[in-house]
């Protein structure tokens, strides 16, 4: 769902975002119930990994948002590419733990066309920039203090924790979700699997 269509749900977005902040680095997401209906429950933020088989990945993730440098990015920008989305903010201790690994994986996979984007749920530009300098993060982040991107993601798979890492396949669908700190070797394997999949539209 495009963000422009979400205005009527601003109050709900604020509630989701507030619950994330009040709980520190993990929270239940009541808006995710429709997405999570019929699936097994899990403990948010425990590092658990959910991988989604090709046939159940659902629709292409669609949203637009503004990066801290002012650039607007939409789902068109990751069409045909493997994309990693990481939800974070600077004061979140687990986010700081996983940051060096995310930086290293970005450096390893960027030459293969994999895109990384952060989704920052709390910080102003100066705070986000200081964090990125400290941990050598060279990929951009969306600013999402209003929670609209998180809300948009619940139409596909609920984030439910900070940090959360999503890997999108070449069709822009959620191939995997990691709740909490992303183990480097696990995330590396997920990205490699997504890269190895055939390109959309090719025999």
Image: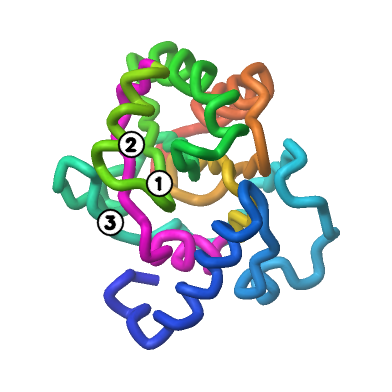
Q: Is residue 97 left or right of residue 104?
A: right
Distance CA(mark 1)–CA(mark 3): 11 Å
Q: Tell us which disc is closer to us: 2 or 1.
A: 2
Q: Quadrant of the N terminus?
A: bottom left
Task: From the image, tell me which residue sits under label 2.
Answer: 128
Residue 68 sits in quarter: top left
Q: Is residue 161 left or right of residue 170?
A: right
Badge number at residue 120: 1
Badge 1 or badge 3: first in the primary sequence: 3
Residue 108 sits in quarter: top left
- Disc 2: CA contacts within 10 A as few (<14), some (14-19) or many (>=20): many
Which secondary structure, mark 1?
A: strand
Look at the picture and state if 132 lies above or below 125. Answer: above
Badge number at residue 108: none
Marks 1 and 2: in contact by CB < 8 Å?
yes
The magenta-colored residue range is 136-157
Look at the picture and state if 101 lies above or below 3. Answer: above
Look at the picture and state if 51 lies above or below 157. Answer: above
Q: Quadrant of the C terminus?
A: top left
**Is 192 within the magenta?**
no
Q: Is residue 109 visible?
A: yes
Q: Position of residue 135 (x, y in %)?
A: 41, 18
Residue 20 or residue 5, whichever sits in front: 20
Q: Position of residue 113 (x, y in %)?
A: 34, 24
Badge number at residue 65: 3
Q: Is residue 50 left or right of residue 16?
A: right
Badge 2 or badge 1: first in the primary sequence: 1
């Amino acid at each position: 769902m495009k963000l422009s269509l979400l205005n009527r749900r601003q109050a709900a977005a604020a509630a989701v975002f507030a619950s994330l902040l009040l709980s520190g680095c993990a929270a239940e997401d009541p808006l995710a119930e429709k997405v999570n209906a019929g699936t097994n429950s899990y403990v948010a933020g425990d590092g658990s990994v959910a991988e989604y088989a090709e046939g159940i990945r659902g629709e292409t993730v669609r949203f637009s948002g503004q990066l801290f440098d002012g650039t607007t990015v939409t789902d068109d920008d990751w069409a045909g590419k493997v994309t990693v989305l990481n939800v974070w903010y600077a004061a979140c201790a687990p986010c700081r733990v996983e940051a060096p690994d995310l930086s290293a994986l970005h450096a390893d996979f960027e030459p293969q066309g994999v895109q990384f984007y952060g989704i920052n749920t709390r910080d102003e530009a100066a705070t986000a920039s200081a964090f990125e300098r400290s941990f050598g993060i060279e990929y951009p982040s969306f600013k999402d203090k209003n929670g609209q991107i998180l809300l948009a993601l619940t139409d596909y798979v609920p984030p439910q924790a900070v940090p959360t890492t999503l890997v999108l396949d070449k069709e822009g669908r959620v191939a995997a979700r990691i709740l909490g700190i992303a183990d480097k070797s696990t995330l590396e394997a997920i990205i490699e699997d997504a890269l190895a999949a055939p390109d959309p539209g090719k025999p």
